[in-house]
Image (cartoon, rainbow, N blue to C red):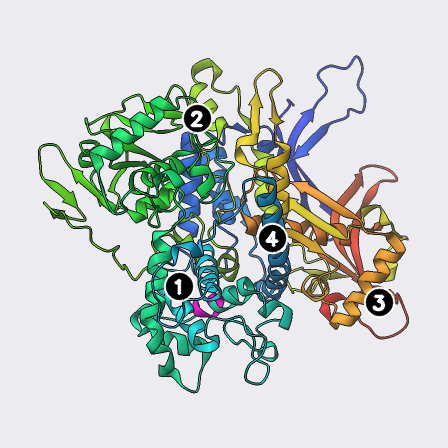
Amino acid sequence: MAPNDRISVQMKRLKWVQVYTGYLNKVPLLTAWPRVVHLTSSCSLKRLQYWYWDSHAEASQAMVRQALEDAGKDSGVSDGGMTNVALTVLKKVVGWPSSKAHIAAIPGNWFSVVEALAKQIDAELTGADEIARTLFEALGTASVGSGGADSSALTGKYGQFNSAEHKKNAATIYSVGKQVGASTRDCIIAIMTAMQESGLVNLDHGDRDSIGLFQQRPSMGWGTREQIMNPEYSSKKFYEVLFKVKNRDQMDMWEVCQKVQRSAFPRAYEKHEKPATGMVRDLEKGGGGASGLKSKPQGTISGLALAQLSVNFCKKYPNIPYTQKYGGTQMAILNGEPPPGLDCSSFVQAMYLRGLGSLYGIPRVASAQYGHCKPVSVKMALATPGALVFKGGSPGSIHHVEMSLGDGKSTIGAHRAGAKPHDVGVNPPMPPSYWDYGGFLPRIAYTTGAGGVIFDGVDGGTEIPEAPDSGVELVTGADAPGYNSDDPFDKLFGDNAWLPISTAENDPNYLMAQALAGPRALLNDQPLLPYLKNLFNSTMRSFCSAPNGDLIAWYPDYYGKWGTAAKMVIQPIEVQDFEVSWSDDYMVTHQFVVTSPQTTNLFDPATGTVQNSVGESVLAQMAAFTTGVVTIDFPGVWKALFGMDMTEKQAKEYADWIKQRFGARPDYQQLPGLVGPKAQLFSAIFLFMRQFAYQYSANVPLTFMPELYPGMIIQIPEFNFQAYVTTVTHNFRFGSGGGFSTSVAIAAPARISGKGNKLLGLPVGGGA
């Protein structure tokens, strides 16, 4: 025998059954005399524990990105592509056969119940977000999250809707639309609707109990009165229903309004199409240029002038740092002299703003900017000063952008692998094959080589056309890997892959991975098992090695509410004895989860560890806007997670009783391997459920039961008792006085039924 030999154990009740498969750790090498020897081993997951890989390597990231994109093709509610990522990594990195990995789906009925909880949490957080943004702005700190539209851009005449209140509400509706992935047309429809329903005024009265911008009714499930009177909340609710209207882009706009609102006068919306369109057009153009640029005519500039402006700017300010800490489009950052920091896409915005005096709707993020451009070949872009070149395997996975200087090879921008310095300025030339896409920005008069002026596909054009009305969304969550347009959670939280996609511009580990080659290639590799643990836990799955060595992962149905946990009925004669303990050591009343920024997990070659260098201000902002919040104060928690039907009053009384008896027990977790609000929320739900279930524990000694697995539920009808199995241990001794037995560690005890007086105080299993 030798370490890492494969070992399997079979035991017998009625017939021989395989109960364990693993790999030897410690074996006897030599003994002086014949004797009993001791072996130690680990389950088959040892293979993952000691299989090292570099998750930041370009090939690894391309593999993960493709797995997310492939998963995004599925319809219905998804787990963000995590199942496909796990299966792909197991197969391609470890060589783990697909037939030996079994990942159970999250119960379909779970999504429908928890969707209501997610909406409740999101609604509760909306007001808190506004308080946090206001505070950060007052402190002069960059705001986290989507930037809002500025009502100062509304300088035209819009029928009867020209007051400051009208413009403020229109800007809010537009901003919320862009945050949730609405198209230009969707935003026009939303503003048209508000014009007709409330006169674009946030009314506190209306027909029957109708209130707010869209005259939504609390009695019809739109929300509470307080929620509906919040313009951001009511706008988000409107878009939620709007997104469910099939083929809405093929309907007249007034018809779409009617599909959402169901008015007695459907064509009344039609008269507002023109003023609503005018408002959206002006909001897309943007406003609030720097004071030094106000006198500059807005409209167009040549590509050559834009490129020259960029070069002059970088010569004037050669030390602008690269950073991603300024989230969204922030005019104060872009207008800085110099800006306190830029990334690749905000550099493009800053140069465009200086050249034209306005952003005209140029978005943040490289992939979104490509969607805003007229696509051209890389060759044409590199031969055209001021054009953009993009890096990414597909339009949806574009992760870097720079500006061409027109000589066929040179570019200027922020932070590219191989560029020195890795900040803002002219970058070393790269061959055309390095780039994947090219694009022409709107309102730029481009000249390619010795040819004529090219603007929006028209040679020799000199007029400045209006921004085109595409009628489709230019920037949408559907471009994000893992985004599922049919998933209500993706609709609720917008575009968010659950895993960070490392690139040269957002992760120093990516640069490290490409730099370490040859004999140093393994220097920053890390075990695969923690990576997979993050994937499974973020999608609320437990996992372990099966008796035959397969990998199994499942949703822990602690109380049998979702019908996915197998049940085993045990008779009292099969139980030796046990005692269930209740400890408040595991109690959590408020679970908080924050996903760490990618750029703060820096590998330290000196120690071989990841050094967390999260700045206090960055971490504070991330925590201030996290959606990873699950608390006993949310009434929906009890039904959604534990099957306990309570009125809001009963839920509040129960939560108050817990806090009075035990005090508030907050728990805060950082999950560095995940990104996005959906991952935060699902991880918080998983941790909250687990901690609640693990308050109760016991070790139950039984007769030998090889059929028991972790994740099952044992039921003892004689005691009206059931519990969730967390660990199964089989004990065996061959020879005289030997035998086989099983012991199980349990959590989440519950009553099998609500009848009788046994075990009062425990929840009823199965959600009954």
Q: Quadrant of the C terminus?
A: bottom right
Residue at 57%, 39% in the rendered image = 141
In the picture, the disc for residue 320 is 2
Report the residue marked by disc 1. Answer: 187
Q: Is residue 274 above or below residue 489?
A: below
Looking at the image, residue 647 sits to the left or right of residue 456; the answer is right
| Residue type, numbered disc 3 | Asn
| Residue type, numbered disc 4 | Asp
Mark 3 neighbour density, 10 Å: few (under 14) some (14–19) many (20 or more): some
Which element type, helix, strand or loop, lies under badge 4?
Answer: helix
User: Which tag, 1 or 3, sits closer to the chain's start?
Assistant: 1
Nearest to viewer (mark 3 / mark 2): 2
Report the residue marked by disc 4. Answer: 129
| Residue type, numbered disc 2 | Ile
In the picture, the disc for residue 706 is none
Magenta-tinted stretch: 239-243
Which element type, helix, strand or loop, lies under badge 1?
Answer: helix
Mark 4 neighbour density, 10 Å: few (under 14) some (14–19) many (20 or more): some
Report the residue marked by disc 3. Answer: 720
| Prevailing secondary structure class for the magenta stretch in the rendered image | helix
